[in-house]
Structure formats: structure tokens, C-alpha cells
Image (cartoon, rainbow, N blue to C red):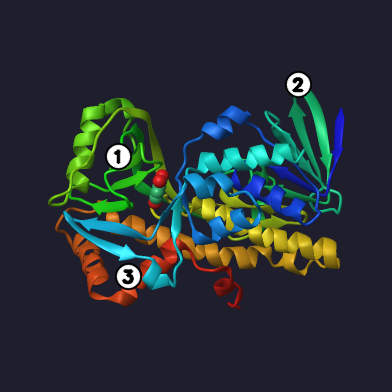
Amino acid sequence: MKTIKTQVGIIGAGPAGLTLAHWLKKHGIEAVIIEHRSREYIQGRVRAGLLEQNTVDILKELGLADRLVKEGQEHHGVYLNFDGKRVRVPFGQLTGGRNITIYGQQEVVKDLTEAWLEKNGQLLFEAPALELEGIETDTPKIHFEHNGEKGIIECDFIAACDGFHGLGRKSMPKDAYKEYSVTYPFSWLGILAHVAPSSEELIYAYHERGFALHSLRSEKVSRLYIQVENDDHVDNWSDEQIWEELSVRLGTEGWKLNSGPIFEKSITPMRSYFIDNMQHGRLFLAGDAAHIVPPTGGKGLNLAVADVKHLVDGFRDFYEKASMQALDNYSTIALKRIWRAQDFSNFMTTLFHKQYEHGSFHYQLQKAKFDYIQLSEAYAMTIAENYVGLPFESFEALD
Ligand code: PHB
């Protein structure tokens, strides 16, 4: 039996767990990460690739943004389409210079993993957490398995950054939180293709045939999505059909979609989920372990990093000032941003997906909103500031 002693035991080497480990180390707080999956798996897991200004600033501050700055693409605006008409929401002038950066989540994971191992950080891959013990005591333990051997992490705190299906949330008593969940009646078929992007900035589109999104990864790789039925399957879609559908849904006069070989195809269900308490005793949840947003707006990774910011504030208070106050307040402060992101992600999802008959009452509401973006700088500003992410101070000032 292997026993590891540390200050913070982290379950999960996704963006939340890795950012937390680096940030704690910067402040002299020890952490060990265990990850259920292999290194190849977590580095190959394709997810959204939109980093808010806050997230980029944090990664820079932690010295983890060298490749992100070189290879990521800063965007100063976004295109929104409705029934073939296109408008641009510029971020710079509406948000005082805040922007987003496009850089794949798996690239962030790659960079953070490499940097952690380079610093001789402890990280065990293919090491599933089996049971959490003593979370209501000052000496919690994570029981895990690695290379067929059982092990224990003895720590002061457990940070469960282990995703929606992880052990963290399941280890909280059922009556410690309330659960909110909405499943949307559609999914996204996402592709990666070897083709130059057809637009320098993202395009979100409502079309009578359903939602479409044009995103990108590099000068040579495009990332695109279309709305499909929940029970649809990638095998139902040939490459030609996907390009045809994207071209129709994203189309505007005088614009042409480039097509090319598709090398990744997958279907993602759309859901909003969260719990209203992210801590119990010495157990703290961060990222998808506590909340899921639909990907329209690309908030998932950014929320995970924001949770980590509040957790780090809390752990620093504990180790530097022997105070539990900030940790006790963790859920309250993190949930303010989570609610905001839930609302914005729901807004973007509702605005651009086809959920009701084309021409119906709800369609007219969607169209009225789209028209309003063009009429009102205040409305465009609301979208821009949510899209690039509100600064931390905004939420900290709330009661
Ligand atoms: C992506 O690039 O994968 C992406 C971008 C924006 C979104 C969702 C996904 O809202």
C-alpha cells in the first residue's frame, strides 16, 4: 500500500486540476494530482477552445502561456447570423479592450501537464480515485489505485476536479446540495477539418434548418458545428452532407465556406447542470464536477479556471493566515459567476438554435433579439461583456 502525504489532494488532471496545482505551487502549497485516464487520453480529448480574457491573464500570470501566446489567436469580435444576415459584435470598444483567444482545450491540458511534470510535480495517470474518507474531518484521505496497487493520499483538503461523472460530487451527502438540470432537445455534431478557416472570427448562426457555428483552431484547421437531433449518430452524416449543411446554415451573400478533409467527428449533447453547494467539510468541487453549461458561448473551461481562482484564494487564506473564512465562502462567490454563465449560455443557446417552428411566436422573439443587437449598443455591450467574461472584481463586489 502506497501512502502519499500532501496538503491538497487533487482528483483530475483537466484544466481545473492542473491550473489549481500550478497556482498552489506558486504560493508554496503542495499538491498531488491523480488522474483516472492516461496522459494520451486527456491530451487528445477534443473540447471547445475559447479562452476568456480572465483565463488568458491567469495562465500568463502563472507562466504557462508561452505556446498559447504564440499559437493562440486573439479575437476582437464575433459574427452573429440570423436567417442569412450577419452582424459583428466588436469586443474592444464595447468592453474596454477585453478579448477572447481561440486555443484548443487539449492544448491547454498539454501545456499544463508538461509544465507540471517539468517542475517535478506529482501526477499519477491511470489512477482512479476509489473512495474519499473523512471529508468531515481535518485529515481527509483519497483511496486510489495505480498499477494494480492500492494507495492513499493523506491531505488537508481534497479538490475534486474530476468532471461530471467523477467521485467528488458523488461523495457529497445528497442533502448537502440542490441540483438543477436542463437537457436541451438537440445536440451538436462537431468536426475538425484540414482546411483554412473561412472567417477570421467565429460565426454563430440561426437558420431555418438549425444552428451552426464556425470556429477554428489554426490557419490550417477549422472547427465547425451543426445542430442535430439528440438521437442522431455521426454515421448518419457523410462529409459531403456536413459541408452542404454548414454552407447553407452559415451562408450569407458574398461569403463562401471552404471545405476540406474532416479528421474528427463527434456528437455532444447539450445540457445545463449545476449544484448550489460546491463544498462539504474538507471536500471542494471545481469545474464540470459541479456544473455543466451548453457550449454555446464556450464558458466551460473558463468557469473551471474561475472556480480555481476562488479556491486558491481560500487555500492561501488558510495556509498564510490560518483562516477558513475564504474557503467557507467558496461556493457563494463561485456560484455568482456560475449563475451568470448559466444565464448567458442559455441565452446564446436559445437565441441561435431552432427549437420552435420557423415563423412561430418563439422564432419571432429570437429574431427580435437579433434585431435589437443591431439597434442598441447597450444590448450588444451586454453580449460582448458576457462573451469575453466579466472581471473577477465585478462579482466580488456583490453581496
Ligand atoms: C470551439 O472552438 O470549439 C468553440 C468555440 C465557441 C463555442 C463553442 C465551441 O461557443
* Nearer to the camera, 73 or 51: 73
Please name the residue that numbered disc 3 is placed on: 380
* Secondary element at image label 3: helix
* Secondary element at image label 2: loop
Toward which corner of the image does residue 360 lie, by quadrant? bottom left
Residue at 66%, 45% in the rendered image: 18
Disc 1 marks a residue whose amino acid type is Glu
**Could you tell me if residue 127 is visible in this image?**
yes
Toward which corner of the image does residue 33 lie, by quadrant? top right
Of callouts 2 and 1, the N-terminal one: 2
* Secondary element at image label 1: loop
Dividing the image into 4 quarters, which one contains the N terminus? Answer: top right
Of callouts 3 and 2, the N-terminal one: 2
Which percent across, then down, holds residue 61? 64, 58
Which percent across, then down, holds residue 388? 45, 62
Spatial distance from mark 2 to mark 1, Cα to Cα?
Answer: 41 Å
Q: Is residue 307 above or below residue 143?
A: below
Say the numbered circle drawn on residue 229.
1
Toward which corner of the image does residue 62 lie, by quadrant? bottom right
Residue at 38%, 72% in the rendered image: 94
- Which circle, 3 or 2, is nearer the viewer? 3
Disc 3 marks a residue whose amino acid type is Ala
